[in-house]
Image: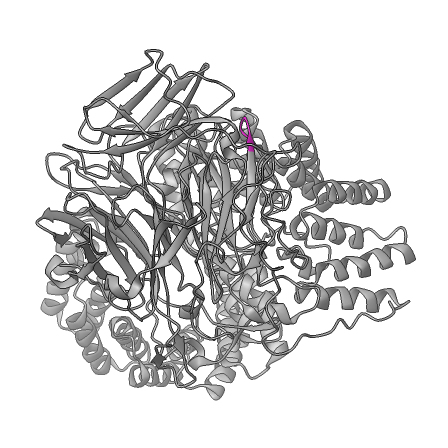
């Protein structure tokens, strides 16, 4: 759960504006009445929240209200499954527990998983009855997510639940007379103790058995939490610590051996080669080659795409996320992935991927180009608006109005409850988003569609709970009751649904690809239960047909390799579910007529108005009062309001400054950033920047920001014009040139894009992003050969770790500007990149905050030493040693300076101190070699010989050390021993000229 920044690199305006801004989210609104409503021009679909009326009454438990630890923030999962095989979809909710102040877990009587059967009510409505106790699923623990699948192909769905702690498998042993699950974790060979999150079943080797993928998160210990259990901070409010700084756990892949047994093949398959904190998982066939690949949304790290390279029974996966364009954002940044779904949003026959991310960022659409490569389609699709203040979790593609185009749902909710204490600040409880797809262009219509409830939503799944042919939505809300959003309008259009049953393929038909042809449009669905975040979906594919009354054909590609085509014979098959057994003719279900809007639907009582949660520690009242007449004070107050996430109030202050100083440009640029990144209002940001550039047309940062805004709006010609002008005005900015390259690449100007990326790489040789973009460009266009492509990606991978450290510590500095450690760590990261001026500035800032900070003195000393300012470096090192004698490496560095100054006695003393204190055993041979050289230069040849021998005994591969040792032996007159050492040098490095020459001289 990263606190990501949108690094706009606007260095000439207020530095706090370089962070991403978060849009203010207004208070909640009450839900509408429960009468079904016809779609309108502004709302193509409409939903009603009916959870309580339908019997979903439980209250989720996920830690305490304050959410002191990261483990408390995500205990909420949901699964859609037909437990008893009656054709009506039931619901299972995953629950957590509370934690007390002593960091132990105490199950609450109100906590525990819930299983609800979907039954007919007396009035004809669908009602959910709690059957948890009788089912055997009444369990307490730190539950997270779940996976549903018929692992033994016996016709009923089994259930796997992930935990912070040991995961569990429950076999469905239900009969006609009872619902019953039996835990079989141990005998199945499952039950990892890692922190499991999302999980999914799929058949990875087409053997007819469902295998299991489990995404794992962090190595978290509640008895030894980060920062010793103290609070961290986010936007000046107290927050739990993590995930950054907590080691990640590798994911697990289990192969189904049959007979209810699984084998862990994580290592042999290549899945556990890297460990990133995984949260969302999706099986999908990226390349349309007939096998299932695995996409994983990782938190604060690059996302995974494991390509299925299995062959001849050897199950192998290759991580290709970076190369295929789905690991990073378009700007080359690792985001904080939460949930993921895949669907064919443009009806071109391939699967596109959507990933929800942390607030202060956009969720990302990766558009499949049909060749297995992806472009960031977030801006072009219209999905970049609105979303920045929202923290997305589960997400779902579904055709909510049955018009033949997949729409999009996103469950939202922040992770820091203390945010609700800040009046006018970023919201903890948030509304869910729903986007309407108008032939590939998306617009957010959640409020108009009735989705007005605010909560800290986590899991969410698509379910047609009333079998009326439209997509309803179930949501698990953290420490709150669930939501069940009934779709009131989807079945006004024609539709057709399928209930698929495998025979040679797995019984659930997971992985089956279905293509429907109707009215000249091709719709594609791939069957998968595990989608979103902590969620399992209705496995039945539905196809909206609008007002079209005919289907040309349905093509079903089963995992077994069988292609089954159902051609139209004139028989009406619309507005119903077809039951299709692999290889057999379909059986039509009950016809569902369109609704009659003249007659109210079943009389569900109107739900009460939703309420914002009570403050955790009391609301902080706004301290605005009367705005000051002092522009400098207004700017300072705007900074503080920004840091608290109170963007509307910050905007008022900036607008007041502009009123008082009409020609002031910097505040206009800052206001534009606030509109763009904070409030999602591109048009107002554009207008403010136009005013700024009318005052000063040579402000490069204003042109750059305007270009990025227009790129978000997909106004490519204008974006290129603004970005090119920014680069002309600031010709040394690699970032500006890189963004110009992105705009050119998106516009198809490939040669010019390459030129921009090469220029950006030359201007900023430490920046990995130009190389990522070059690799993508070459791979997708063939502009350069495969060797150039490979070199570009390799350079990106080499430079990325250092840049990610920089990005990480920039975030920390924004959070903790008055802590000396923050600028020191950022300075160290810059130092490792070779960006010496920025390193010096940050070391200096750290020492301003704390002149006795040993680490910053040490860093400044290293910088001075590299510049050749040895006296100043020695003074810095000595000052650092005085504060902390145990600083790693400092004695070695002091010794090197004294050595260079020919003060060999001081060098020997420094090296000996270093050897006495060293903890890194791998560094001992080098330190011994340095000590030996200091002894030798000081004329202490016997001491030098002893130190050389000890160094070479620990590491015989030191060529230069062995050469120097031989010279000492010669100085002692031991020609034979010296020759032996030079011969060993030549054995290890035959081209060593010094050893060759000296051996010739001896001979």
Magenta stretch containing residue 438, yes or no? yes
Residue shown at the point (21%, 58%) measured from the top left: 180
Q: Majority secondary structure of the magenta segment?
A: strand
Residue 606 appears in the figure: yes
Apparent side of residue 141 relative to residue 981 in the rendered image (left or right):
right
Q: Quadrant of the C terminus?
A: bottom left
Residue shown at the point (35%, 24%) measured from the top left: 515
Where residue 902 appears, x then y in whole percent? 41, 77
Magenta stretch containing residue 400, yes or no? no
Comparing 758 with 995, the one in front is 758
Where residue 662 appears, x then y in whole percent? 90, 52
Apparent side of residue 649 relative to residue 101 in the rendered image (left or right):
right
Residue shown at the point (50%, 36%) measured from the top left: 400
Comparing 134 with 985, the one in front is 134
- Residue that extends furthest to the bottom in the rendered view of this protein: 882
Quarter occupied by residue 940: bottom left
In the rendered image, the vertical position of residue 728 relative to residue 857, given as above or below: above
Where residue 680 appears, x then y in whole percent? 67, 47
Question: What residue span does the magenta drawing correspond to?
Answer: 437-441
Quarter occupied by residue 284: top left
Apparent side of residue 196 relative to residue 775 in the rendered image (left or right):
left
In the rendered image, the vertical position of residue 755 relative to residue 921, given as above or below: above
Where residue 714 appears, x then y in whole percent? 62, 32
- Residue that extends furthest to the top in the rendered view of this protein: 569
In the rendered image, the vertical position of residue 465 relative to residue 521, given as above or below: below
Residue 870 appears in the figure: no
């Amino acid at each position: 759960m990263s606190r990501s920044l949108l690094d706009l690199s606007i260095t000439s305006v207020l530095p706090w504006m370089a962070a991403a801004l978060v849009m203010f989210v207004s208070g909640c609104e009450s839900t509408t009445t429960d009468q079904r409503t016809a779609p309108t021009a502004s709302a193509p679909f409409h939903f009603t929240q009916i959870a309580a009326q339908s019997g979903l009454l439980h209250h989720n438990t996920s830690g305490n209200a304050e959410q002191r630890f990261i483990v408390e923030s995500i205990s909420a999962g949901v699964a859609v499954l037909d437990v008893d095989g009656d054709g009506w979809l039931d619901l299972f909710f995953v629950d957590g527990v509370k934690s007390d102040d002593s960091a132990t877990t105490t199950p609450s009587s109100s906590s525990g998983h819930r299983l609800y059967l979907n039954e007919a009510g007396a009035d004809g409505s669908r009602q959910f009855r709690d059957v948890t106790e009788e089912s055997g699923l009444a369990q307490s623990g730190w539950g997270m997510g779940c996976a549903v699948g018929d692992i033994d192909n016996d016709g009923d769905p089994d259930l796997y639940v992930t935990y912070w702690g040991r995961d569990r498998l429950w076999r469905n042993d239900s009969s006609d007379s009872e619902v019953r699950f039996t835990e079989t974790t141990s005998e199945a060979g499952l039950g990892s103790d890692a922190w499991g999150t999302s999980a999914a079943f799929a058949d990875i080797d087409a053997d007819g058995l469902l295998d299991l993928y489990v995404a794992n998160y962090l190595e978290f210990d509640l008895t030894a939490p980060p920062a010793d259990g103290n609070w961290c901070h986010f936007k000046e409010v107290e927050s739990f610590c993590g995930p950054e700084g907590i080691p990640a756990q590798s994911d697990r892949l289990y192969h189904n051996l049959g007979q209810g047994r699984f084998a862990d093949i994580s290592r042999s398959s290549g899945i556990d080669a890297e460990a990133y904190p995984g949260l969302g998982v999706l099986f999908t066939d990226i390349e349309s080659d007939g096998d299932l690949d695995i996409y994983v949304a990782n938190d604060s790290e690059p996302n995974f795409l494991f390509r299925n390279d299995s062959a001849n029974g050897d199950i192998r996966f290759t991580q290709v996320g970076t190369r295929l364009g789905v690991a990073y954002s378009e700007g080359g940044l690792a985001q904080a992935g939460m949930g993921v779904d895949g669907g064919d949003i443009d009806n071109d026959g391939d699967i596109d991927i959507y990933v929800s991310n942390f607030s202060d960022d956009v969720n990302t659409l990766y558009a499949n180009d049909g060749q297995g490569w992806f472009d960031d389609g977030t801006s072009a699709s219209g999905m970049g608006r609105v979303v920045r203040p929202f923290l997305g979790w589960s997400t779902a593609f579904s055709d909510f109005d049955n018009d033949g185009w997949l729409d999009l749902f996103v469950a939202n909710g922040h992770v820091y409850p203390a945010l609700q204490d800040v009046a006018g600040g970023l919201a903890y409880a948030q509304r869910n988003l729903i986007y309407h797809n108008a032939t590939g262009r998306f617009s957010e219509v959640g409020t108009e569609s009735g989705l007005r409830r605010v909560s800290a939503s986590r899991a969410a799944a698509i379910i047609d709970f009333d079998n009326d042919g439209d997509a309803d939505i179930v949501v698990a809300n953290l420490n709150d009751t669930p939501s069940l959003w009934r779709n009131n309008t989807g079945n006004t259009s024609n539709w057709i649904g399928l209930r698929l049953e495998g025979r040679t393929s797995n019984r659930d038909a997971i992985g089956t690809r279905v293509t429907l042809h109707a009215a000249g449009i091709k719709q594609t669905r791939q069957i998968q239960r595990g989608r979103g975040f902590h969620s399992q979906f209705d496995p039945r594919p539905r196809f909206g047909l609008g007002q079209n009354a005919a289907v040309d054909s349905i093509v079903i590609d089963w995992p077994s390799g069988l292609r089954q085509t159902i051609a139209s014979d004139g028989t009406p098959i619309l507005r119903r579910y077809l039951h299709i057994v692999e290889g057999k003719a379909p059986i039509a279900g009950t016809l569902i007529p369109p609704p009659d809007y003249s007659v109210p639907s079943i009389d569900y009582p109107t739900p009460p108005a939703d309420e914002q949660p009570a403050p955790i520690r009391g609301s902080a009242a706004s301290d605005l009062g009367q705005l000051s007449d002092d522009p400098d004070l207004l700017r300072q107050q705007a900074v503080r309001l920004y840091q608290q996430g109170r963007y509307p109030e910050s905007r008022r202050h900036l607008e007041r400054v502009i009123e008082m100083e009409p020609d002031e440009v910097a505040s206009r640029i800052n206001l534009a950033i606030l509109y763009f990144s904070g409030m999602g209002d591109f048009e107002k940001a554009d207008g403010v920047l136009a005013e700024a550039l009318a005052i000063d047309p040579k402000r490069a940062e204003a042109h750059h920001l305007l270009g990025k805004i227009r790129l978000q709006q997909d106004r490519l010609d204008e974006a290129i014009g603004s970005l090119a002008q920014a680069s002309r005005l600031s010709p040394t900015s690699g970032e500006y040139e890189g963004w110009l390259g992105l705009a050119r690449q998106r516009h198809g100007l490939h040669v010019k894009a390459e030129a921009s990326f090469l220029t950006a790489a030359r201007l900023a040789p430490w920046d990995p992003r130009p190389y990522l973009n070059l690799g993508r460009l070459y791979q997708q266009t063939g502009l350069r050969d495969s060797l150039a492509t490979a070199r570009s990606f390799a350079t990106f991978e080499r430079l990325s770790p250092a840049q990610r450290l920089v990005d990480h510590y920039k975030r920390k500095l924004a959070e903790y500007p008055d802590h000396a450690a923050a600028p020191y760590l950022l300075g160290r990261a810059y130092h490792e990149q070779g960006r010496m001026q920025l390193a010096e500035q940050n070391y200096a800032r750290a020492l301003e905050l704390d002149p006795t900070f040993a680490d910053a003195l040490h860093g400044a000393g290293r910088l001075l030493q590299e510049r050749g300012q040895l006296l100043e470096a020695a003074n810095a090192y000595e000052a650092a040693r005085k504060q902390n004698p145990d600083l790693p490496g400092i004695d070695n560095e002091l010794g090197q300076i004294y050595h260079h100054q020919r003060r060999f006695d001081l060098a020997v003393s420094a090296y000996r101190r270093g050897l006495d204190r060293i903890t890194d055993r791998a560094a001992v041979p080098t330190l011994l070699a340095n000590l030996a050289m200091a002894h030798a230069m000081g004329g202490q040849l016997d001491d030098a010989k002893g130190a050389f021998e000890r160094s070479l005994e620990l590491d015989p591969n030191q060529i230069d050390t062995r050469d120097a040792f031989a010279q000492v032996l010669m100085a002692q007159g031991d020609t034979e021993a010296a020759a032996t050492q030079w011969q060993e040098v030549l054995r290890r490095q035959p081209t060593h000229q010094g050893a060759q020459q000296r051996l010739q001289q001896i001979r």
